[in-house]
Amino acid sequence: MVIPFLSLYLVKAKGFTLPEVGWIMSCYGVGSLAGTYVGGWLTDRMGFHKVIVLSLFLGGLGFIGIQFLDTFHAVCAGIFIAIFLVDSYRPAIFVACDAYSKPENVTRSIALIRLAINLGFSIGPVLGGLIIARINYSALFWIDGVTCVIAAFLLYIVLKPKKVNKDRDEEEALKEGLPPFKNFAYMIFFLIMVANGIMFIQYFSVMPLYYKDVHFLSEDLIGALLFINGAVIVLLEMPLVGWLERIQISRTIATFWGVVFLALSFIVLNMSGWTGVLIIGMLLMTLGEMIGSPFANALALSMSPKGRKGSYMGVFSMSFSLSHIIGHNSGMNLVNSFGYDTTWNIMFYVLLGVALLTLFLYRFLKKSPNFTTY
């Protein structure tokens, strides 16, 4: 509930400028990047179960604590620490999916986790908007933090840990497979994911300010608009992915269409001053997310050699963290310097470039003997 309203909270309740909010949100990204790396390191040593429980518990306390910080540097540090704790669960989730699933079901298990996240995210912004409108921002931090702590206790009590066993073949493959940063095709894919992520996260930092400043929407209406994203994903993503798999769309081409629809979601905002265009933009972004995200995740898995899936998926998760480091700051400063309309135009053209790079990756992977999985 906190994240969708964080930029609004920092501007409206704390009085920070847009560039300051950009730097604070960059601290969010640095915390996410560091948390993802350390979370993966801890998962190998402590096990995924302990990492996820500790992440939920300590992250919940972190969310509660943010509201008591007032100065720019204190908020930067607080956001870094809270998100470091919260996002340390990411690599552990991939390992948990591997531990609790049959090998042939891992991708669908990850899709199911995505469905759960989006179900929560479809409800969270609506409740968050209502809490802000009816009570205040402080209640938002308390409720979000306490629910994280409750979730940690439930997970600790209900879900039993399960060991992950590595066979000898995987250990041999670990020696033979290229590390992710030496894999040219994977680094191109990583660059695509970072650039796409930079644009995507504007919907959760700059876009709420656009809704408020240009279209004069209240916090509860902003929450309702964000609800559309989560609700449509919960209702339609699994059937849509199933249909796309039946027509045997390439995972790389599906990623391409995800980028294209995200680009269209920005440019459509400049085509009309009608408030209804915000819904059209949200639906286009959601369509791009539904097509692009599951297949990009599956593409990352299929490009990962046996024995190195953990490190490859860790790098894949880091792409989103890097997007936070760059995206919030660049978006806020673009708006501050050029205004919203020019910012949307810039993002549209950058995404067209990303789409062309995705087509290049598709042609490159076409030469691979494993092309059918790409």
Image (cartoon, grey):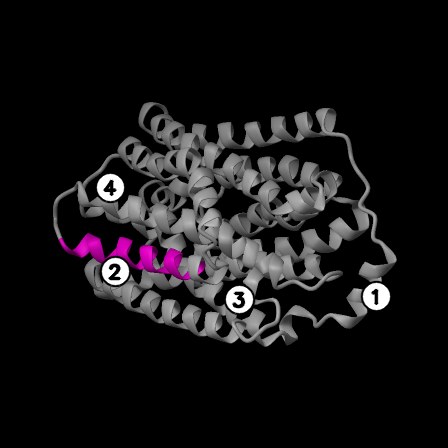
Circle 4 packing at 10 Å, graded few (<14), some (14-19), many (20+), is: some
For the residues marked 2 and 1, what is the alpha-carbon distance in whole angstroms? 48 Å
**2 or 1: tag closer to the N-terminus:** 1
Provide the residue span drawn in magenta: 255-271
SS category of the residue bearing label 3: helix
Closer to the camera: disc 3 or disc 2? 3
**4 or 1: tag closer to the N-terminus:** 1
Query: Which residue appears at 25% of the width and 49% of the height?
Result: 210
The quarter in which the C terminus is drawn is bottom right
Closer to the camera: disc 2 or disc 1? 1
Circle 1 packing at 10 Å, graded few (<14), some (14-19), many (20+), is: few
Query: Which residue appears at 79% of the width and 65% of the height?
Result: 173
Depth check, front residue: 23 or 225? 225
**3 or 2: tag closer to the N-terminus:** 3
* Dominant secondary-structure state across the stretch colored magenta: helix
**3 or 4: tag closer to the N-terminus:** 3
> What residue is shown with label 2?
344
Q: With respect to residue 230, does 26 lie above or below?
A: below
Depth check, front residue: 253 or 188? 253
Circles 2 and 1 in contact, beta carbons < 8 Å: no
> What residue is shown with label 3?
190
